[in-house]
Image (cartoon, rainbow, N blue to C red):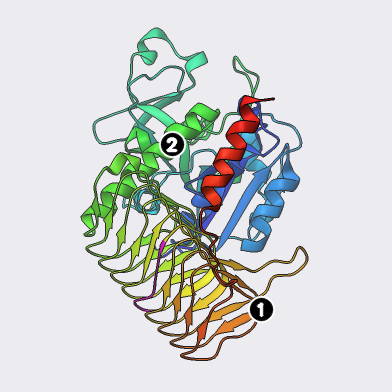
Amino acid sequence: MTQRPIAAIILAAGKGTRMKSDLHKVLHPIAGRPMLLHLIDSVASLDGERTVVVTGAGREQVEAAVAPLGVGTALQAEQLGTGHAVLQARAALYGFDGDVLILYGDVPLVRAATMQRMLDRLAAADAPATVVLGFRPADPAAYGRVIADVDGRIAKMVEYKDATAEERAVTLCNSGLMAVRSADLFALLDRVGNDNAAGEYYLPDIVMIAAANGRESAVIETDASEVAGVNSRAELAAVDAAWQQQRRAQAMADGATLIAPETVWFAHDTKIGRDVTIEPNVFFGPDVTVGDCAVIHAFCHIEGAQIGAAAEVGPFARLRPGSVMGAKSKIGNFVEMKKTSLGAGAKANHLSYLGDTNVGAMANIGAGTITCNYDGFFKYKTNIGAGAFIGSNSALVAPVTIGAGAIIAAGSVITRDVSADALALVRPDQTEKPGWAARFRAAMTVKKNNP
């Protein structure tokens, strides 16, 4: 592991016109988190001293996204190539003495371990001037090529537009990601020209400029999926799918059972315990923790929720932010929870809405129960005591408290607090009129037949 200070320059100045979106390209989410923040998080895990995002079109959106993280920005007012973009970070890195990673905001899945490999290679005994991250795609297409020997020493870097037919036949491609010492970076960039087919200042040119001074550069390789870029909605979906595939594999390796892995969608921060079972078609939004031995049945949507050990969810349940399920509690089919805590062993098995509610341990919420938590202006709390039994088709009009052990009769509309161990019954007396139904049907039949 290198002990030198680390800085990162992340290029995010492109317009991203192929996304056809008002949202900046690098802010489109992968697993519920903007792709740029995935990259910043990976850099942060290396204890980087400085991170600078180079902005351009849509700079206000990017600046607003990174400001809370303490990440600096630099503006590339004109898009004159990747070398020109990196130069814009010079002032932000003034006084920095260490190693610099050059990354791309639309290449979000680069792992911290790969970044560290680049830095370690830069610190190797042969002291390469730069380290380039290469890959071998199934279709090299129009990627720049890296011409290197078997030991990874680079003989030439060339953009596809400027490459010969022989050079285009090389399969090792340039991802654009590099590691360079700060003492070398801007001095090399100052010497980059734009005498090429596109008239741009290419970052990779610093490799050959260093070579002209007798300093070799090196390439290390990674899998093509790790450096997949996002320039369109289709590519965004493909990168998200690749992330999901890796996360599903990790969940199973960590001891969870996924009945149909390809149908389960995780967020970037989903935490899954051991011996958890997840049935098909489950979607996890951000900020979800699932305890050991819990069961998530099919077709559930869960976000912002804590699910306790051996709890059971679904099928067809929705847990919204602020939902907390205690150990061995249960939420059944077509039940929705929002800002609600369900005590240990409590259950709501069918067709219920629980919002802004505290449910005590071992309480039972009958089918069709709703907590009426909103009056059109404000939200109110409902408290249901431990061991209480709420009969089917009941409405609890908040603010209201149901005491421990109380029973609410089916069909009740509760508007006042109920004492512990009491029975609350709110419905009119049942009356019966013998023969009325038969007389009604006869009268209506005559009326129907004689319009």
Asked if residue 17 is positioned above or below residue 122 in the image, the reply reads: above
Question: What span is colored magenta in the figure?
Answer: 344-349
Residue receiving disc 1:
399
**What amino acid type should be assigned to the residue bearing mark 2?**
Val
Estimate the spatial distance between the alpha carbons at disc 1 and disc 2, rounded to whole Å.
46 Å
In the rendered image, the vertical position of residue 106 relative to residue 381, given as above or below: above
In the picture, the disc for residue 274 is none
Q: Relative to 227, say whether 143 is above or below.
A: above
Labelled pair 1, 2 in contact (Cβ < 8 Å): no
Q: Residue 440 sits in which quadrant?
A: top right
Q: Position of residue 383 (x, y in %)?
A: 55, 81
Is residue 272 positioned above or below 417 on the image? above
- Closer to viewer: mark 1 or mark 2: 1
Q: Residue at x 55, y 34 (%)?
A: 203
Foreground residue, 13 or 153?
13
Mark 1 vs 2, N-terminal side: 2
Q: Position of residue 388 (x, y in %)?
A: 44, 82
Q: Which quadrant is the N terminus positioned in?
A: bottom left
Which residue matches tag 2? 239
Residue 261: image x %, image y %? 28, 43
